[in-house]
Image (cartoon, helix red, strand yellow):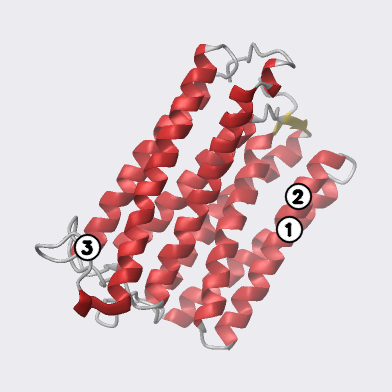
Amino acid sequence: MDQLTTTPMSRTSPQIVSLRRWAVVSLVANMVIVWTGALVRLTKSGLGCASWPQCQPGSYVPLPENGMHGLIEFGNRLLTFALAAIAIGTYVAARRAYRAGAMPRRLLTLAFCVGLGIIAQAVIGGVSVLVQLNPWVVGLHMAASVGLIWICVEMVHLTFGLSRMAVPRRLHLLTIVVFWLGVAIIALGVVVTGAGPHAGDGAAQRNGLAPDLTAKLHAWAVWAIVAATVLGLIWAWALPRVRRLWLGLLAIILLQGLIGYVQYFTHLPTGMVLAHMVGTTLFAAALGHLFFLTKGRDASV
């Protein structure tokens, strides 16, 4: 990572404070759109707009006959424009800070990648409608969102000047294992969703996999990450700042696990499924927070 040339005063300047706000808003917005996307799916509004980029053939806005489903899907589409505006604002603020020597070039690159990611999200969303909510294409939607959340987490780190903390090698290796196990858990969650009943529209196809089997595989992976996170917490106990990272991650995992089991045994009520999606974004952010904020003691800055 390139070194910053900021002074303590420059980091508290209005320009830097504004940049930090843009970065935080970008992170929150990319989490919120996952929640609204889940709401679209849970209300069976995925084909409320049956075309793309138009909502309906010949109309960019929902028609009265589309009812509430059309409004919900159209509202979710409008959020993409809000995300695009936030991405542009973040990039402009990052460029100004970089030119002033207050931020590294990496921040500028990350801000640009967020913009590209939002464009990709719009395209994936359009394709998912055109292929009648194919669960694998819809899954790409979620994968892209998680990737954007991780990019935004690193942007927040850079804007707040959070330096990576050196940890013992075994703890760093465990951090890598936990991160990729978390990636696998999120991917399995996408597969479970594609096998389950909440397709986004009554006519949408499912992936054909057994819901019970995929849910069990997902649960087993969660138990594995719980064990690994508890071990990480034990190894990090003597390092207060690092310990808090592991403790926060463990708390979110346990909460997610509880919600997951409740939704499974209560036959997937929409409120619990939505809560689980909110938890997924928190889990992704906490996972990235731990991963990007620690390094091995023998690693370069």
Q: At numbered mark 2, what does the secondary structure look like: helix, strand or loop?
A: helix
Residue that label 3 marks: 61
Indicate left or right for 134 with 288 as reference.
left
Of pointers 3 and 2, the one earlier in the residue sequence: 3
> From what the image shows, is residue 131 above or below residue 291?
below
Q: Whole-Å distance between the Cαs marked 3 and 2? A: 46 Å
The mark closer to the camera, 1 or 3, is 3
The mark closer to the camera, 3 or 2, is 3
Label 2 CA crowd tier, 10 Å (few <14, some 14–19, many 20+): many
Q: At numbered mark 3, what does the secondary structure look like: helix, strand or loop?
A: loop
Q: Position of residue 100 (x, y in %)?
A: 55, 12
- Residue 266, by quadrant, is bottom right
Label 1 CA crowd tier, 10 Å (few <14, some 14–19, many 20+): many
Give the numbered dot on residue 250: 1
Label 3 CA crowd tier, 10 Å (few <14, some 14–19, many 20+): some
Q: Are marks 2 and 1 in contact (CB under 8 Å)?
A: yes
Q: Nearer the viewer, residue 181 or 243?
A: 243
Furthest residue to the right?
238
